[in-house]
Amino acid sequence: MLFNRRRVRIRPAEELTEGESLKIVEKMDDRDLLLYLGLTNDSNPLYIQHDFTAAAGYDRPIVPVVMLNGIVSSAVSKHLPGPGSRVLEQRFRFPEAAWHGSTVTFDLTVINVDLFARTALIRVEAADEENRSVMTGELVAEVAPVTGGSTEISALGAPDGGMDERETNSGRG
């Protein structure tokens, strides 16, 4: 993958609004699962072996919860609040297993903005195409302070630059 310079905007906490939301739809495909297994050396057969998952009482292989968490973390750092932000704390439950091959819709909603602490409390709900809840909870994201008066800076980025406006409820790209 080639990287090029692009302009990114650090979004000040003052611009975040309670109720602002972001929707992401992700397919839990073979490529991503195999990348995860290779990077982490996680060899749990529950993630890939159909006969083992059947014996363990599951319909099919499941998605590791850290992959779901990674999608949320990526959404925070790229979109809501955006570049320069980071997750400070999180509390998630995974009521149902996400199936390998399923399509999961993640809904992130800003619940509270603390301008003094420069943090945003964000609710996360994720469900598969059968409307089964696969992730629910909240996280606290630190919003990067704007220094030097400019909120737009040059940064390395992938050519696609991330999601486009169609994938967000707030209309931000």
Image (cartoon, rainbow, N blue to C red):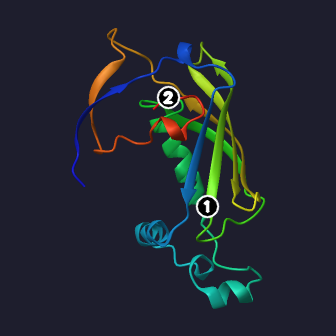
State the residue lying farthest toward the front.
166
Mark 1, secondary structure of its residue:
strand
- Res 45 label: none
Q: In the rendered structure, which amino acid carries the disc numbered 1?
A: Thr
Q: Please state if 38 lies on the left or on the right of 72 as rendered.
A: left
Along the viewing direction, whichever of 128 and 63 lies nearer the viewer: 128
Q: In this picture, is 58 found above or below 3? A: below
Q: Return the x and y of residue 3 as percentages of the image width and height.
A: 23, 46
The first of marks 2 and 1 along the sequence is: 1
- Res 103 label: 1
Residue of label 2: 172
Q: Residue at x 68, y 21 (%)?
A: 18
Instruction: Check disc 2: other Cα within 10 Å, few if <14, some if 14-19, many if 20+.
Output: few
Q: Return the x and y of residue 122 as percentages of the image width and height.
A: 66, 33
Instruction: Check disc 1: other Cα within 10 Å, few if <14, some if 14-19, many if 20+.
Output: some
Q: Quadrant of the N terminus?
A: bottom left
Quarter of the rendering containing residue 31 = bottom left
Q: Residue at x 69, y 25 (%)?
A: 19
Q: Residue at x 42, y 30 (%)?
A: 84
Along the viewing direction, whichever of 116 and 105 lies nearer the viewer: 105
Mark 2, secondary structure of its residue:
loop
Q: Return the x and y of residue 60 as percentages of the image width and height.
A: 67, 79
Q: In this picture, is 155 found above or below 112? A: below
State the residue lying farthest toward the top.
149
Q: In the rendered structure, which amino acid carries the disc numbered 2?
A: Arg
Q: In this picture, is 149 found above or below 78? A: above
Evaluate if marks 2 and 1 touch, with contact meaning CB atoms under 8 Å apart: no
Q: Residue at x 53, y 44 (%)?
A: 73
